[in-house]
Image: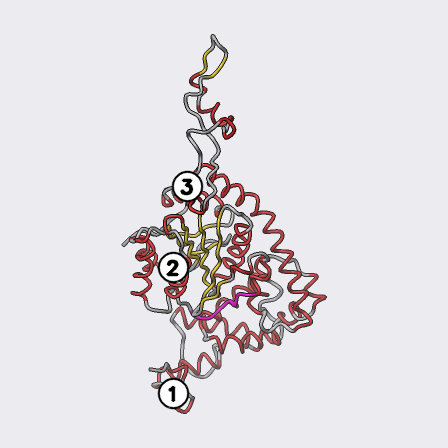
Amino acid sequence: MASDDSLPISQMPIPVAGERTRRWRLMLGGDADGTGCALTGESDLGMDKTLSTLYSESEKKGKGGLGGSAPNVARWLGDIRSYFPSSVVQVMQKDALERLNLRQMLLQPEMLETVEPDIHLVSTIISLNRVIPEKTKETARMVVRKVVEELEKKLEGPLRQAILGSLNRAMRNRRPRHADMDWNRTIRANLKNYQPAYKTIIPETRIGFGRKKSASSLRDIILCVDQSGSMAASVVYASICAAVMASLSAVKTALVVFDTSVVDLTPELHDPVEVLFGTQLGGGTDIERALGYCQGLVRTPGDTILVLISDLYEGGNHDKLLRRAASLVNAGVQVITLLALSDRGAPASDHVVAAQFAALGIPCFACTPDQFPDLMAAAIKRENIQQWAASEGIVTARAE
């Protein structure tokens, strides 16, 4: 059955009197609107605030609004996606370009070159990339690339070291040949066997570097990233981390982004800027469908780490989502859910689904980009992720 939003206006049901008044109140805005209707629900108040930011007369005269604040812009763009369907969001974005400072900031290359780029501005550019005119797109790409390169410099070293180090330890040879000896670790492991009379150490325990290079010794890492508006910063960080990991031959990395559809961006991982411009922030959410696609990428379940980055607000079938998640876990895939991958803390998330995932043995928590390399190292070494999170002071979801 078609939803009300998909029906022609002439066929839409007429709202009851109270609902009609509420809609007029939201449409007219302001306290002195003449409707006599007071908004009380959190959703209505939030919707009224986003509409007022864009359409109230005080904002048109320049009093308040989003100003030049990239965090405020990114937050507002996320809010409108939470409250309105995609067709309305597109209209509001275009109106924002005209009525607020977004046009000055994003449509003039000279202005865009002068702003201080940060992840919030990148999120805003990616959110609006479908409506930015051609003359500005190249400048927008330059701004995005600058931020991406700065973040890559920050994340690449720790991420590369953590992953390669954990793989080396996972593959360490306890009966090495002379050429494969890891002398530093062997000496440390045998200091207790030092013989003063001979001034030497008896190497009772020998540790060597692993030489195993077959596919079974590798890890497959799949990042499955929610594109909804509230996950904007997470999409940016996840794309950069995926690009770094894709450059490591020791692991096979895939990047999948989704809303109600699924897009595999793995072929673009050589350039994280192209990855970001290949995303479309906003829209609905079908997590089950995305996990189903990722399940098709699994080659060896026991060597696969699937990181789902999502606030877990499922727009599809809730029961099918749980069955799909259970199927992945039962197959031996190591599944981890990050409610956010950002420096801004955990956003609102579906606590019920998080608890149900936790009951399946899937850890659910928010993670900062600085913590992500250590998380991946712990996952590669098959450590207990709940215990790792606790050692980092991270609060995880509890099973119901």
- In the image, the segment drawn in magenta is 278-284
Going from N to C along the chain, the mark reached first, 2 or 3, is: 2
* Figure check: 284 above or below 369: below
Q: Amino acid at mark 3?
A: Lys
Q: Amino acid at mark 2?
A: Gln
Please give the label number shown on residue 381.
3
Where the N terminus falls, by quadrant? bottom left
Where the C terminus falls, by quadrant? bottom left
Q: Nearer the viewer, mark 1 or mark 3?
A: 3
Q: Residue at 51%, 50% (x, y): give it.
A: 369
Q: Residues within 10 Å of mark 2 (few under 14, many from 20)?
A: some
Q: Residue furthest top?
A: 197
Circle 2 is placed at which residue position? 295
Q: From mark 1 to mark 2, how far is it between C-alphas? A: 40 Å
Residue 367 among those drawn in magenta: no
Q: Nearer the viewer, mark 1 or mark 2?
A: 2
